[in-house]
Image (cartoon, rainbow, N blue to C red):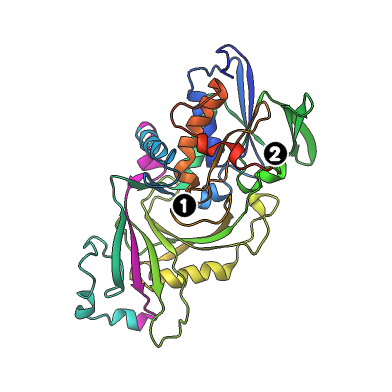
Amino acid sequence: MKASVSEPKNIIIIGGGVVGCSAAYFLTRHAYYNPKIHSIVILEASKIAGGSSGKAGGLLAEWATPKCLAPLSFKTHVELAKEHDGGKIWGHRRVYCAEVELQAQEGDEKISLATEAESQAQPATVPSELDWLLPGSAKSYKESGNPKNSGQVNPYMFTRTLAELAEEKGVKIVMGSATAINYKNNNQSIASVQYSENGISKSLEATDILLSAGPWTPRLFPRAQLKAPRGHSVVVRPSRDLSPYILFPSIEAPPNGSLRHVLSPEIYPRPGDRLYDFDTVYASGPDDYDVPLPETSDHVAVDKKSCDDVLIAVRSVSQEIRDGEVVTRQACYKPQIRPHEEDEEVGPIVGPTGIEGLWLATGHDEWGIQNAPGTGLVMGEMIFEGAAHSANCDSLDPKHFLEER
């Protein structure tokens, strides 16, 4: 139902990740928003961008899934960067993307002994600007994205900045762990959010609740069943700035070497931004389902060996990364509806739940950073107008994903 322009609203956003902060930003930019009669609260259990929103790769792609949302969100990323100096603050820039087959090399001696013939052995399809791979390591190169349809951000700075911009327009950030959603009218509509702050139980009355708690969403709304894969990543300061090529490699172990198995981490060179005033490289390894989701993002366990395996792999294909300095080792959990093929469209879950005033925005999986602005934009339209008009989100309606009551 379309809201009256003068109808007071108490909107509670559960989750201070990129989706929740994007929603808060766009709610405050909606034509109906009036801070005199509308209150918006972000309720966050640990810290803004404490989970995958601060530890993801940050790839942006017009060619991402789902097709009903990705182009809008890619375009919105560009507009946000232009309006708020995103290039300097959160490292927004255009990039190339490619699938590459690489041959690992091990040991300083072997790397330094790369010959001129090996250097010239790179396939003709490898761009000359991609000059930070070891000579002879690239066996094939297939472009999957270019600066017209691909980009990147530093997810942590992007999310934090959206939260700050929302605060400037009247959004309040409350640090507390949501423990329950309270209902009324025989569970047909929402009433309030129960939460814990320093061990003290409190509540916030609400006309609308947007549940955007990532993989923690099912703990408050079990009908939204999600898997929670964990991924490890590292951030390295390379020995020099690297050209903007995001690589999705298949790395083959070196022949007759001690490295019998090498991971194939995604590799993201990043420009300097407000978090780091120097260029970095982000690299992420495979997901696992070995460790259950902890209570909050503060309690995510980082397995050093998993991070070291990522480092071994990326160092085996780039001297600049090998000579670089490790900035951080980290891990995070993603909200996943189910495992799926690379180009298969599965979610996210965006829209009304059928319970008056309760909305969902979760299950974004690997495209959370990319699709967050589009999600925030359409959620603002849904909450204030009753329906989205910037994109057709019918295929993302929670009715397609929720378990029966």
Q: Which of the pair 249/153 is nearer the observer? A: 249
Q: Position of residue 320 (x, y in %)?
A: 34, 67
Sequence order check, earlier mark of 2 and 1: 2
Amino acid at pointer 1: Glu
Residue at the spot of label 1: 344
Q: Secondary structure at mark 1?
A: loop
How dense is the environment of label 1, judged by Cα within 10 Å: few (below 14), some, or many (20 and up)? few
Q: Amino acid at mark 2?
A: Gly
Asked whether the viewer can see residue 165, the reply is no
Give the SS element for disc 2. loop
Does residue 320 sit above or below 244 in this rendering? below
Q: Is residue 199 above or below residue 125?
A: above
Quarter location, residue 280: bottom left
Chain part drawn in magenta: 83-109
Q: Residue at x 48, y 68 (%)?
A: 310
Work out whether residue 116 or residue 138 is closer to the camera in this orientation and state it.
138
Label 2 crowd bin: few (<14), some (14–19), many (20+), radius 10 Å: many
Q: Nearer the viewer, residue 25 or 395?
A: 395
Is residue 108 one of those drawn in magenta? yes
> In the figure, is residue 238 to the left or right of 170?
left
Residue 257 at x, y = what percent?
A: 42, 86
Query: Where is residue 256 drawn, in percent x and y?
Result: 40, 88
Residue at 23% in and 60% down? 129
Residue under numbered circle 2:
176
Q: Nearer the viewer, mark 2 or mark 1?
A: 1
Quarter of the image where the C terminus is located: top right
* Residue 320 shows in this picture: yes
Residue 49 x/y as whole percent: 55, 45
